[in-house]
Amino acid sequence: MAVGTELRSQSLLTTVVAVLAQIVLITPSLADDQRSDLGFGKNADYWEVRFGGGAYDFGPTTPSDFEGGVVNFEVLAPSPDFLERFGAPRPYIGTDVAVSDDAIHVIYGGLNWEVYVTRRLYLGFGGGGSWNTGPREASASGATKDLGSAFLFHVQASIGLDITEKLTLQVFLNHVSNANIDSDNPGLESVGGRLGVRF
């Protein structure tokens, strides 16, 4: 990846993290959070819609051959009662729509867990499967990204902050790959920020 592209991607990620940090500073102190709501399953009964964007083909564990942005959209359903014993994960379906000349779009779904570390600050983790539109060849750099299959595993990590009970902000990482089942496993990642609304 070109130096300019790498610097733009790093700048975007820095901006997303800085915005989340500013929100933490202007809302009531996290140190004042009561710890009664810690743990899994706090939002198990809610539907949630998430929308945001970030850097395309950018992340810590995959080659960053392409450049551009990604538009992210997700819907999470309430957790079924039988999953309560497993931390009350919520089923989710989402998409990363790449805004790039060399776009590989992804549709994904699975189960999403959230664990609160304070009353408003939480960590999220999701896992499941995905479908993608690859492979693509980048005309500028000549790089080719062949993910090996249209159907891959999907893993997601996030850090979130509740602004209100129904409104939340997140920094997220999406990762799709074949989990080294095949010898060729370049993977594809997106990193960004998004707004979530629960109802």
Image: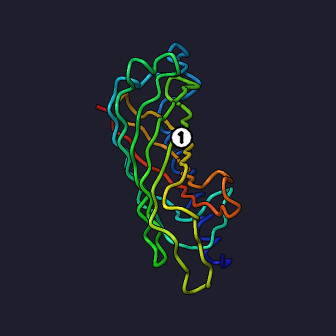
Q: Left or right: 48 with respect to 19?
A: left
Task: Tell me: residue 157, above or below residue 89.
Answer: below
Along the viewing direction, whichever of 3 and 35 lies nearer the viewer: 3
- Residue at 63 percent of width and 64 percent of height: 10
Q: Residue 188 lies in what quarter of the image?
A: bottom right
Residue 168 percent location from the top left of the image: 41, 37
Q: Quadrant of the C terminus?
A: top left
Which residue was labeled with disc 1?
127
Q: Residue furthest right?
A: 183
Q: Which secondary structure, mark 1?
A: strand
Along the viewing direction, whichever of 63 and 149 lies nearer the viewer: 149
Residue 125 percent location from the top left of the image: 55, 37
Amino acid marked by disc 1: Gly
- Residue at 52 percent of width and 47 percent of height: 171
Q: Residue 50 lies in what quarter of the image?
A: top left
Q: Quadrant of the N terminus?
A: bottom right
Q: Residue 64 lies in what quarter of the image?
A: bottom right
- Residue at 34 percent of width and 33 percent of height: 77
Residue 135 percent location from the top left of the image: 52, 72
Crowdedness near tag 1: few (<14), some (14–19) or many (≥20) residues, C-alpha within 10 Å: many
- Residue at 57 percent of width and 86 percent of height: 140
